[in-house]
Amino acid sequence: MWHCLGAGVSEAAPARVGREHGISRELVVSAALRLVEEYDVSALTMRRLATELGTAVTAIYWHVGNRDALLDLMVDQLLADMREVSVKGRTPRTRIESLCVQWRQELWDHPHLIAIAHERGKTAAMFQPMQAALAKELHAVGITGRAAAASIRMLQLHVVSSVVIARTAERGPVTDGTDPNAWPVLTDDPELIAALGGPVDYVETFRTALTALVDRILR
């Protein structure tokens, strides 16, 4: 599933860091993250990193070890970033919605890193901070235990599936609109047929469905 989160390859080259900045573990990890975000994990080689940083390949190995160890460091940085959860709004509904919107944006913005984390068995750790933040908001309105767990699962499924479907549509071929003749004769609703045949606003659809889901959870 998680490979569906990946975006297309960008042609924009990452900015290079000159020799005068020196080399450190943090700098190497930052450059590696930038490479993977701009392209994908296949673009990450020690030689290319050395070129981007204006240093020798041996210096890369000295600071971060081998490529596998570097991937672990990158995942650690992603997990650290995803622990920074912010809640917005004054009502329970708006606060829960803000968390889900933030969650979706994180998954959308970092498709390749999310996929790496998943492949390395870190999906649960990656999602735990947002789950904890949602649990806190649910506890505040008296939703606890199994009911809270089910609610968090529903919200998580909605967030993840929204990103996967949007990514799949983005990467797939352009499809034809709905054929009006394919509808049953009794469906006398041309506005409905025309609307379903048009383009999908995945963000707006996500937000509308999210509001309905949160209202159902809080009722």
Image (cartoon, rainbow, N blue to C red):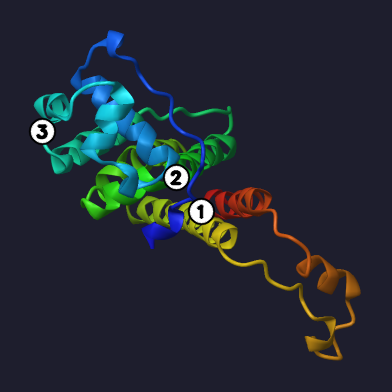
Residue 162 shown left or right of residue 83 in the figure: right
Residue displayed at 25% across by 39% down: 75
Q: Which residue is mark 2?
A: 107
Badge 3: few (under 14), some or many (20 or more) residues near its Cα, within 10 Å?
A: few
Q: Which residue is mark 3?
A: 65
Residue depth check, mark 1 versus mark 3: number of the one nearer the observer = 3
The quadrant holding residue 63 is top left
Label 1 secondary element: helix
Label 3 or label 2, whichever comes before in sequence order: 3
Residue 29 shown left or right of residue 150 in the figure: left
The percent position of residue 192, horizontal first and vertical second, equals 83, 71
As drawn, the label of residue 163 is 1
Label 2 secondary element: helix
- What type is the residue that disc 3 sits on? Gly
Nearest the viewer among 22 and 183 is 22
Label 1 or label 3, whichever comes before in sequence order: 3
The percent position of residue 64, horizontal first and vertical second, equals 14, 29
